[in-house]
Image: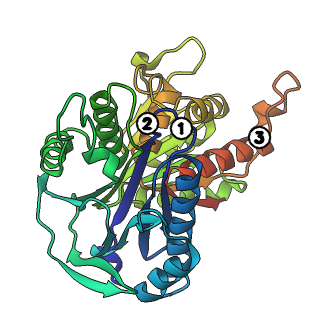
């Protein structure tokens, strides 16, 4: 594949459990590879524990088999043979939607008895051409099309289009109403997680806080990757200082430098002065600096530690986005990036050898590694380069 057409596929999903049940009867599985993303939304028959088990098994089987190269026919046949049919109603144990998006935008969608997908193209709902095929006695809808940067696909369980039925709305929310709502929010809610969260919140309101069915929203969005380079610490060999700065400046996208010694090296090599940003003065976290050519300059270990704390504990972003200090600004730029490269220097900071400051190289590396794992869990592509 031509790397010039290799886009980033952002994913997000959220669920509400039916009122009175402990487990959600819907499940989502997402498989990310270097070439594509496969996402499955399965809706188990009924609700509660049984529905949860059936939908989880369905989603797991689909993802695992597709990962191993199985055909759709083999996947459906395996599901049909593996999971039971409802004897009373003779209905399928679980409905499902499968979405596969390649990094060049080529998209393949398979739908079995779930509500039709919503395709947002430039913020407008666009019809998707599909054809019905029969596999193992099941009527399956297949669609193939090419997504472009900025496009999004939204899949939902039927709890979404049933929202408010018999309560706020006589016939539920209906597919067309959901489509209209998605068009509105997609203009201002940019990320896949934003779209899921807003749609889910509206469903909860329509159910008056007591969902009459399990509700799940899955969103996949294609875009050009937002890249970030973060330099942490000076090189082990001082002779590599010019090489470090050259590597930073050659990278595309945003650039961040963490640590006083590191920022001094960059400043010296570029022949530019660092200015303290008084707008980021904080009682706990050292202020940031301004350096032409670098998007953010922060202090080192204290700022990194606090950034890690924010990323771990501030799930809704209430602190990260409500104040401006070195750690919140670093957390924001990390969360706003898709492909992140850490350039980590292995030199030991002489200041950290003071017994009054028991901070060492090992702690810095540990913090960077923990931040890396957290970012990966959020779907970011992260690489580490050591000097």
Judging depth in this view, the residue of 57 and 311 nearest the camera is 57
Q: For the residue carrying disc 1, how many other residues have a C-alpha within 10 Å: few (<14), some (14-19), or many (20+)?
A: few
Which is in the foreground here, disc 3 or disc 1? 1
The image's mark for residue 177 is none
Q: Which residue is mark 3?
A: 363
Mark 3 Cα shell of 10 Å, populated few (<14), some (14-19), many (≥20): few
Whether residue 84 is situated above or below residue 193 in the rendered picture:
below
In the structure shown, which secondary structural element does the residue marked by tag 1 occupy? loop
Q: Position of residue 17 (x, y in %)?
A: 47, 40
Residue placed farthest to the right in the image?
Answer: 355
In three-dimensional space, the C-alpha distance between marks 3 and 2, rounded to whole angstroms, equals: 22 Å
The residue sitting at 28% across, 73% down in the picture is 105
Left or right relative to 379: residue 197? left
The residue at 48%/15% (across/down) is 281
Which residue is located at x 56 percent, y 36 percent? 311
Graded by Cα atoms within 10 Å as few (under 14), some (14 to 19) or many (20 or more), the crowding at tag 2 reads some
Q: Which color mode does the image show?
A: rainbow
Numbered disc in front, either 3 or 2: 2
Look at the image and tell me whether residue 58 can be seen: yes
Horizontally, is 280 left or right of 61 in the view? left
Q: Quadrant of residue 165?
A: top left
Q: Which residue is mark 1?
A: 21
Q: CA distance from mark 3 to mark 1?
A: 44 Å
Residue 211's x, y, as percent?
39, 34
Query: In the image as oriented, which residue stretches furthest toward the top?
Result: 283
Residue on which the image places disc 2: 332
**Picture residue at 50% right of the left edge, 74% below the top:** 62
Please identify the quadrant where the N terminus is shown. Answer: bottom left
Toward which corner of the image does residue 358 lie, by quadrant?
top right
Query: SS of the residue at dot 2?
Result: helix
Quarter of the image where the C terminus is located: bottom right
Mark 2 or mark 3, which is nearer the start of the sequence?
2
């Amino acid at each position: 594949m031509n790397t010039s057409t290799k886009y980033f596929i952002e994913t997000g999903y959220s669920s509400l459990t039916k009122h009175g049940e402990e487990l959600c009867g819907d499940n989502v599985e997402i498989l990310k590879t270097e070439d594509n993303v496969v996402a499955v939304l399965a809706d188990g028959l009924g609700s509660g524990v049984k529905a949860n088990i059936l939908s989880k098994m369905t989603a797991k089987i689909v993802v695992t088999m597709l990962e191993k190269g199985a055909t759709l026919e083999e996947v459906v046949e395996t599901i049909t043979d593996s999971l039971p049919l409802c004897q009373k109603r003779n209905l399928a144990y679980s409905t499902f939607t499968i979405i596969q998006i390649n990094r060049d935008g080529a998209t393949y969608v398979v739908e079995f008895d779930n509500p039709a997908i919503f395709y947002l193209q430039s913020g407008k709902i666009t019809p998707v051409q599909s054809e019905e095929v029969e596999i193992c006695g099941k009527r399956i809808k297949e669609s193939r099309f090419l997504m472009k940067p900025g496009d999004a696909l939204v899949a939902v369980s039927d709890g979404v289009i049933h929202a408010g039925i018999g309560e706020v709305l006589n016939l539920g929310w209906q597919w067309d109403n959901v489509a209209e709502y998605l068009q509105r929010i997609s203009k201002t809610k940019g990320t896949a997680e934003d779209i899921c969260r807003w749609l889910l919140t509206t469903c909860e309101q329509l159910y008056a806080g007591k969902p009459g069915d399990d509700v799940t929203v899955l969103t996949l969005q294609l875009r050009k990757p937002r890249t970030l380079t973060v330099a942490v610490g000076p090189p082990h060999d001082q002779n590599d200082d010019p090489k470090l700065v050259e590597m930073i400046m050659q990278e595309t996208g945003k650039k961040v430098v963490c640590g006083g010694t590191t920022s001094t090296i960059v400043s010296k090599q570029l022949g530019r002065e660092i200015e303290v940003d008084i707008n980021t003065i904080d009682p706990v976290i050292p202020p940031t600096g301004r350096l032409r050519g670098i998007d953010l300059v922060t202090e080192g270990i204290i700022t990194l530690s606090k950034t890690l704390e924010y990323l771990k504990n501030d799930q809704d972003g209430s602190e990260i986005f409500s104040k401006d200090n070195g750690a919140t600004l670093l957390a924001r730029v990390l969360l706003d990036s898709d492909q992140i490269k850490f350039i980590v220097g292995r030199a030991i900071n002489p200041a950290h050898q003071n017994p009054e400051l028991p901070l060492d190289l090992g702690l810095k590396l540990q913090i960077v590694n923990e931040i890396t794992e957290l970012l990966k869990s959020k779907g970011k592509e992260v690489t580490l380069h050591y000097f």
